[in-house]
Amino acid sequence: MIKIEEVVKSGGCYGCSACYSVCPQKCIVMKQDDEGFFMPSIDKHKCIECNLCDNVCIGTDQYEFSNNKVVKAYAGWTKNKNKRYSSTSGGIYSEIVEDTLKSGGNVYGVVYDKETKKVQYSSSDLASFNLQKKSKYVEAELLETYKNIRKDLTNGRQVVFSGTPCYVSGLKKYLGVKYDNLITCDFICHGRPSPKLFRKHLDYLECKYKSKIESIDFRPKLIGWSRLQHLEIKFGNKKVKRFYNMKDFFFSSFLKNISLRKSCMRCDFANNVHSSDITLADYWEYKNNPNLINDNQGISLILCNTAKGNLEISKIKSRCQLYDISENDFKYVFHERTDTNYDLSRRNMFFKNFMHNDYKENVKKFYKTTSFKMTIIFYIKNLLLNVLAFWTARMKGNDIV
Ligand SMILES: Cc1cc2nc3c(=O)[nH]c(=O)nc-3n(C[C@H](O)[C@H](O)[C@H](O)COP(=O)(O)OP(=O)(O)OC[C@H]3O[C@@H](n4cnc5c(N)ncnc54)[C@H](O)[C@@H]3O)c2cc1C
Ligand code: SF4
Ligand code: SF4
Ligand code: SF4
């Protein structure tokens, strides 16, 4: 308990909930802190000082179940057009889970609940899996996920878990032993923005556009995977709003690395420390490989970190278009985090302003700090995006307002 208290104090807590899940006395709860991130809170009166929480904490040692070797790497996509279109990059994740879903296994991933505006974990079957697809660039609440996974695994059920590298690492440490019936996937991770900030932003948009938000897509592909990335929000009044990523306040603060969890600012997992079987990412460096033609429908980078991960990819090969790639083609995804790329004091200042002052006023102020030149560029890109989306939707025969 002493160690996890220090980890939380130092800002090194990953919010993985391994300590919460392991505590035999149920004296740890995962609570949102002032910035909105999930942190363990301990009721010391109930604690029996068994130290199980300290032993599973990845804030003290995240390397126990990790490796930093890529067994095999690919770039590619699923040949199923619908799966690819409805996924963030090449839709490889949907192929990885297919056999597990068809055989009645459990797939644990992240969904958005429009009623509560929460981004959280859920287990899916074949019918509900679609909700898990696509990146939600927000910290996801884990709830009872680790405990449920252990139950499934000990009952012999096939399980796939997907999440941030730190969540996979936390799960592996909590489980403590290797299970043949578990497949884990993570991704190259930019970081997790605050769920409280996300909630405030959605409330602000609902108020501004006078309608309830029905759905959010952080990576819509209507005009293509690599063109003018944006946020697409569908409102209850049937209106659809598209915001070029740097023009939406929430998205731009995510991309500028100022609305992220403290542990993301100095994350060890950014240097190729992965506990998962497979790491996925958007493959932006497709130009490295002359055989790869970008048709703008999404290209995945697939890193097999274990022999098991490699076996899973070989099972789905016939359903995918895959290209072998070498270390030189993917090493761009690993880089150390320092104040140059992840400025801690800017991040702390951001939270000081946004959590304690009027949100609407702060959004206004935030835009005032953007230079005139950049404001014009973002405005033009936003306009271009909306014109392109309008014509693409018309050509495809979609309803668009
Ligand atoms: C917070 C975050 C940051 C990312 N940063 C980068 C990056 O810097 N560079 C890069 O190349 N790729 C990044 N990705 C990964 C990328 O966006 C794609 O998710 C990945 O390429 C897999 O795409 P796919 O088409 O195979 O499957 P998809 O269908 O898009 O994959 C969805 C899977 O991601 C999981 N997921 C979605 N949201 C979350 C969340 N908030 N927390 C945990 N798991 C989640 C879902 O459970 C599901 O299993 C990030 C993803 C997230 C969620
Ligand atoms: S020391 Fe044991 S009882 Fe105390 S908080 Fe940690 S896990 Fe719970
Ligand atoms: S186990 Fe996870 S949630 Fe608990 S203190 Fe350590 S890093 Fe934080
Ligand atoms: S950047 Fe690191 S700490 Fe942050 S969510 Fe990703 S893996 Fe976890």
Image (cartoon, rainbow, N blue to C red):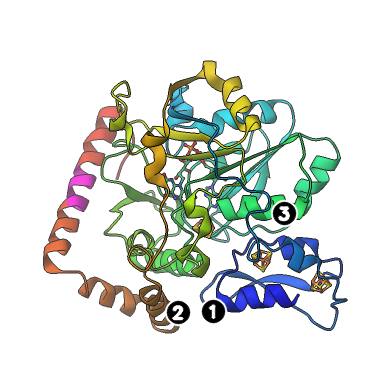
Say how many tags the image has: 3
Magenta-colored stretch includes residue 386: yes
Q: Which quarter of the rendered picture does the N terminus lie within? A: bottom right
Q: Is residue 350 visible?
A: yes
Q: Which residue is mark 2?
A: 355
Q: Which residues are magenta?
A: 381-387
Is residue 140 shown above or below 122?
below
Residue 87 horizontal/vertical position (percent)? 46, 36
- Residue 26 lies in the magenta-colored region: no
Disc 3 residue: CB within 8 Å of ligand 3: yes
Q: Is residue 97 left or right of residue 200?
A: right
Nearer-the-camera pick, 183 or 200: 183
Quick one: label 3 or label 1, which is nearer the N terminus? 1
Q: Amino acid at mark 3?
A: Lys
Residue type pointed to by label 2: Met
Residue at (84%, 77%) from the top-left corner?
47
> x, y percentage for residue 222?
33, 37
Q: Mark 1 near mark 2, Cβ–Cβ under 8 Å?
A: yes
Report helix, strand or loop for mark 2: helix
Mark 2 Cα-neighbour bin, 10 Å: few <14, some 14–19, many ≥20: some
Quarter of the figure that contains the C terminus: top left
**Left or right, 173 with reference to 66:** right
Quickly name the residue at label 3: 173
Which label's residue is closer to the chain start, 2 or 3? 3
Q: x, y percentage for residue 86?
A: 45, 35
| Residue 34 tag number | 1
Magenta span: chief secondary structure = helix
